């Protein structure tokens, strides 16, 4: 596995290696990332892409709306590189800020898709976040030029935003979802879980329980009430605990014909946690 830190070197490496699958990350990798990388490796093999799976490790400053969150974002490069290698990545691209955003060069933010601005979920609670995500992902796509790219389902709105951005910009890149990987007790893996105190680590399990409770409801409103009540039992007030159209993230289609998603984001102690699950009305 090669490690490359500049765009020039990356272009040379990719020209030799050939077409690839891409997994963008911000490092602090855990088993959830390893699963995305293994999926990328498998896909590259299935499609006979000689460039294999390329992983980027870049903590993108422009997507953090809270400077404290950016400052404490874990940096664990040695362990990350070892995990990429163990998962079968062919190349790690770990650029500096000046490589991604060269001084004096305008790196435009693409027009944001509706799902990045309308639903009132992460778009409302993290103003500017999706502008930063779209800007860096488009930039990385233009540098790496992958055939396909894998994004985790844990950041469900991000997955919909990137899928819509690629479609709107007619970029020839297939966006592949990677299922959420969970700890044995059900907590969705996240680079920020390490900041949970032991007591908050236990309280955090309420998110998963709330999603399970939603599954027993027969309407979105009942599902939302069930999630709020389970979270309240652990004194957790969610930023949102909602059922939405799985793709647009707007209010569910009343006919129920389109897939739904239950989504929760809540602060537990000092950590903002996200989780989500497919939701369908329980048939009575
Ligand atoms: O999901 C992430 O880790 C980041 O938002 C991404 C896609 C790597 C862009 O910085």
Image (cartoon, grey):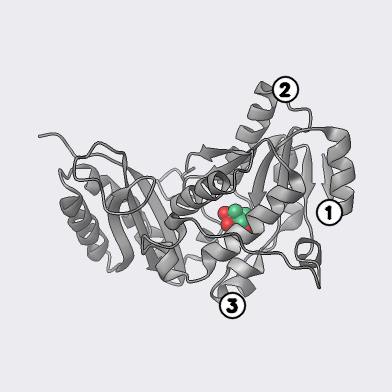
Task: Report helix, strand or loop for mark 3.
Answer: helix
Numbered label tally: 3
* Residue 228 located left or right of residue 72: left
Q: What is the quadrant of the N terminus in the image? A: top right
In the rendered image, the vertical position of residue 63 relative to residue 212, given as above or below: below
Image spot of residue 106 (x, y percent)? 74, 68
Task: Name the residue furthest bottom.
Answer: 67
Q: Nearer the viewer, residue 19 or 155?
A: 19
Q: CA distance from mark 2 to mark 1?
A: 24 Å
Q: Earlier in the sequence, mark 2 or mark 3?
A: 2
The percent position of residue 269, horizontal first and vertical second, equals 41, 71
Helix, strand or loop at label 2? It is: loop
Residue 230 got which mark? none
Q: Residue at x 76, y 61 (%)?
A: 100
**Which label belongs to residue 67?**
3
In this orientation, which residue lies closer to the viewer: 223 or 236?
223
Query: Is 163 located above or below residue 194 in the figure?
Result: above
Q: Name the residue tied to disc 1.
A: 7
Calculate the distance from the C-alpha at mark 3 to the C-alpha at mark 1. Answer: 27 Å
Which label's residue is closer to the chain start, 2 or 1?
1
Name the residue: 64% across, 35% down.
40
Is residue 53 shown left or right of residue 249?
right
Asked whether the viewer can see residue 27, the reply is no
> Is residue 241 visible in this depiction of the protein?
yes
- Camera-side residue of 161 and 235: 161
Label 2 and label 3: CA atoms lie apart by: 42 Å
Q: Which residue is located at x 40 percent, y 46 percent? A: 185
Which residue is labeled 2 in the image? 48
Badge 1 density bin: few <14, some 14–19, many ≥20, Cα 10 Å = some
Q: Earlier in the sequence, mark 3 or mark 1?
A: 1
Left or right, residue 215 beside residue 94: left
Q: Secondary structure at mark 1?
A: helix
């Amino acid at each position: 596995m090669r490690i490359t830190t500049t765009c020039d070197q990356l272009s040379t490496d990719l020209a030799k290696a050939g077409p690839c699958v891409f997994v963008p990350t911000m490092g602090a990798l855990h088993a959830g990332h390893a699963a995305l990388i293994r999926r990328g490796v498998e896909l590259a093999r299935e499609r006979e892409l000689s460039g294999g799976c390329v992983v980027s490790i870049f903590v993108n400053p422009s997507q953090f709306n809270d400077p404290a969150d950016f400052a404490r974002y874990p940096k664990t490069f040695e362990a990350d590189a070892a995990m990429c290698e163990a998962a079968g990545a062919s190349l790690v691209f770990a650029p500096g800020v000046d490589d991604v955003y060269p001084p004096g060069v305008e790196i435009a933010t693409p027009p944001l898709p509706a799902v990045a601005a309308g639903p009132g979920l992460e778009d409302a609670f993290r103003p500017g976040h999706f502008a930063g995500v779209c800007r860096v992902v488009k930039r990385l796509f233009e540098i790496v030029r992958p055939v396909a790219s894998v994004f985790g389902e844990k950041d469900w709105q991000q997955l919909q935003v990137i899928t819509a951005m690629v479609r709107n910009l007619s970029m020839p890149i297939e966006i592949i979802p990677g299922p959420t990987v969970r700890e044995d007790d059900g907590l969705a893996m996240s680079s920020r879980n390490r900041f949970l105190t032991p007591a908050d680590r236990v309280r955090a399990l309420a998110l998963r329980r709330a999603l399970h409770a939603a599954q027993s409801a027969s309407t979105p409103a009942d599902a939302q009430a069930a999630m709020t009540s389970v979270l309240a039992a652990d004194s957790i007030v969610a930023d949102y605990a909602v059922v939405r159209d799985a793709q647009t993230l707007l209010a569910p289609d009343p006919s129920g014909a389109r897939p739904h998603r239950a989504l929760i984001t809540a602060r537990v102690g000092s950590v903002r946690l996200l989780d989500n699950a497919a939701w369908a009305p329980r048939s009575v």
